[in-house]
Image: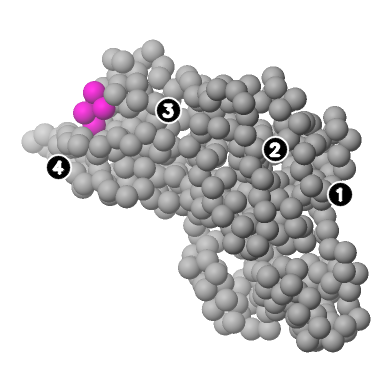
Amino acid sequence: MVKPRAPRRVGGRDGPARLPLARVALLIESSRAFGRGVLDGIAECLRRQRWLVYYQEGGLGELLPKWFGAWQGDGIIARIEDRRMARILAQKGIPIVDIRGVCAVPGVPVVKTDNTEIARLAAVHLRNCGLEHFGYCGYEGAEYSNKRGEVFAGFIREAGFPCRVFTTRERRLAGVRSQEQFGWAHEDHLIEWLRSLPKPVGVMACNDARGHQLLNAARQLGIAVPGELAVIGVDNHETICELAVPPLSSVEQNTGAIAREAVALLERMMRGQPPPAAPLLVKPCKVVPRRSTDVLAVPDRNLRKAIVCIRNQTARGVGEIAKIAGVSRRDLERRFAAVFGHSPGQEVLAVQLQTVKKLLTETDWPLYRVAEKAGFRHPEYLNVAFKRQTGMTPRSYRLQLRRPA
């Protein structure tokens, strides 16, 4: 375990001693949406920290600049890529926080995204499209990809549907960049896999780059998206998502919260506190829907009417929704349970809470106005429902997403 250094103090006979600026190195890529998001979050936190930051732009595979060998500092926040990088960092003998978590290093705590929650959000989003066939496409050998695929397939199979997982005949490659480059160079593997899938099908990609590759392969095959194929990625890298045709839906990671947790943890460690033994898991923000999943594959016309009504929030109450759909309330509940595995009331609440999250993030409206816009009759009920789903109050959710710790 890394033993924290005693804080240096400056001062003299004419003034009180005070803690100096802490020297902190940030070994985080700037070439990807995740790294840039974390860097932006750390920049927000620095308004409250007495830190001298040492940082050089680079991509994955370029996180150890030449100056780092001679650098002397007090703490490090890093995306530790492999054992070699872990050894070099450990030689500094100072507190380190890892925000990747692919290498277990004694004494180095991890702050990372909750991959189980990412997979759950993607599964729920595709299930709500009314699909009955599903797939997962990742990179073999990538720990984060394997985890997301395992959990996604588990959620789908628990709901009673098959999930086909993409595998390649090629050897496993180390490093995200190598995996993505191989994917672009071997589109034929994706084309062959997509051709074999039953249609219509919903596919989760391990990240946005993989989702983009899937959509390219689908265009070459002439597969209609979203009519025959719906795809969702991870990271919400806006450039990649908008370059894809059609634009790619994606799960947005909470990079701001990851940054705040990492900064607060490193600060505590530099003050002599021990690191936590278990990783700190940060839940993703939300699904950002785009055209790649804009599908409602439900053959039941009455059920389609009900879903459109709920998602457009054009009716209040399940009884009114059933009337618009042209069925009885009891029949609507039966059909909902058979297709989606939950009640129309639960669907209404999910849409309302998604609206609440959007308004809390994008506006400064008071809670009563947010509740009214989202279809809640009373702010008190919104508070209860929101806390039951997210584990926090609407106010706490807004502060977590929009302000530094």
Q: Which of marks 1 and 3 is nearer the N terminus?
A: 3
- Residue 50 seen in this snapshot: no
Callout 1, which amino acid? Gly
Callout 2, which amino acid? Gly
Callout 4, which amino acid? Pro
Task: Indicate whether 70 appears above or below 124.
Answer: above
Provide the residue designation for mark 3: 81
Judged from the image, the secondary structure of the residue bearing numbered disc 2 is helix
Left or right, residue 401 beside residue 305: left
Residue 248 shown in magenta = no
Q: Position of residue 35 (x, y in %)?
A: 52, 34
Judged from the image, the secondary structure of the residue bearing numbered disc 3 is loop
Mark 4 → mark 3, Cα distance in angstroms: 42 Å
Task: Indicate whether 3 appears above or below 149.
Answer: above
Q: Where is residue 15 in the image (x, y as percent from the top left)?
A: 14, 39
Judged from the image, the secondary structure of the residue bearing numbered disc 4 is strand
Q: Which mark lies nearer to you, 1 or 2? A: 1
Callout 3, which amino acid? Glu
Provide the residue designation for mark 2: 211
Majority secondary structure in the magenta region: loop
Q: Position of residue 331 (x, y in %)?
A: 81, 83
Whether the residues at callouts 4 and 3 have beta carbons within 8 Å, the answer is: no
Q: How crowded is mark 1: few (under 14 residues within 10 Å), some or many (20 or more)?
A: some
Q: Which mark lies nearer to you, 4 or 2? A: 2
Count of numbered tags: 4
Residue 227: give its label.
Answer: 1
Mark 2 → mark 3, Cα distance in angstroms: 23 Å
Task: Indicate whether 351 appears above or below 368.
Answer: above
Q: Give the range drawn in magenta.
A: 90-94
- Residue 95 seen in this snapshot: yes
Residue 16: give its label.
Answer: 4
